[in-house]
């Protein structure tokens, strides 16, 4: 940025964001089958300044990657179905692996 503030004024420029994590995991149905080739989102349980919805798409084995995720608690949503919840720790820096998330019951 090239900024030239006038006398007795200034500019505030935010550089970076807390939403700098990438979440990796796999999604399973209650019967053990993967949630294959679906689009979904991570929806923050408590919306905040940097906490926004993050979309993802699964591969054939149910593996997903969600980018630009801020620390906090999120529910994993596919359409109107809540598959599960995850937590991104406050001290996370970059890659957060959440393992296999299995939907508890069919909705």
Image (cartoon, helix red, strand yellow):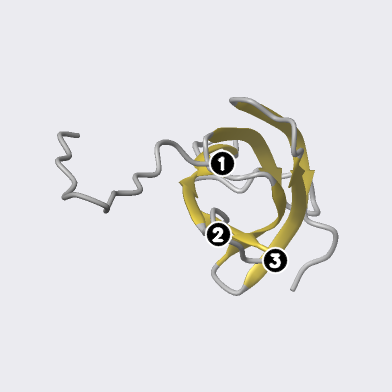
Marks 1 and 3 sit apart, C-alpha to C-alpha, by 15 Å
Instruction: Look at the picture and state if 1 lies above or below 42.
Output: above
Q: Quadrant of residue 94?
A: top right
Mark drawn on residue 46: 3
Cβ–Cβ under 8 Å for marks 3 and 2:
no
Q: Earlier in the sequence, mark 1 or mark 3?
A: 1
Q: Percent position (x, y) of residue 27? A: 67, 44
Q: Quadrant of residue 88?
A: top right
Q: Quadrant of residue 14?
A: top left
Mark drawn on residue 6: none
Q: In the picture provided, is 35 more to the left or to the right than 97?
A: left
Q: Is residue 101 visible?
A: yes
Label 3 element class: loop
Q: Earlier in the sequence, mark 2 or mark 1?
A: 1
Q: Percent position (x, y) of residue 32? A: 78, 44
Give the crowd class for mark 3: few <14, some 14-19, many >=20 residues within 10 Å: few
- Quarter of the picture containing the C terminus is bottom right
Marker count (numbered) = 3
Marks 2 and 1 sit apart, C-alpha to C-alpha, by 9 Å
Label 2 element class: loop
Residue at 61% from the left image edge and 48% from the top image edge: 35
Q: Residue tagged by mark 1?
A: 18
Q: Is residue 38 visible?
A: no
Marks 3 and 2 sit apart, C-alpha to C-alpha, by 10 Å
Q: Percent position (x, y) of residue 73? A: 74, 54
Instruction: Look at the picture and state if 32 lies above or below 96.
Output: below
Q: Percent position (x, y) of residue 63? A: 58, 35
Q: Residue tagged by mark 2?
A: 49
């Amino acid at each position: 940025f090239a900024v030239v503030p006038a006398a007795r004024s200034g500019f505030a420029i935010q550089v970076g964001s807390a939403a700098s994590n990438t979440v990796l995991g796999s999604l399973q149905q209650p019967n053990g089958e993967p949630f294959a080739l679906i689009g979904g989102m991570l929806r923050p349980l408590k919306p905040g300044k940097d906490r926004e919805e993050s979309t993802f798409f699964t591969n054939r084995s149910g593996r997903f990657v969600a980018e630009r995720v801020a620390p906090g608690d999120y529910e994993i949503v596919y359409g109107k179905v809540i598959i599960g919840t995850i937590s991104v720790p406050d001290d996370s820096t970059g890659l957060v692996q959440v393992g296999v998330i299995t939907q508890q019951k069919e909705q």
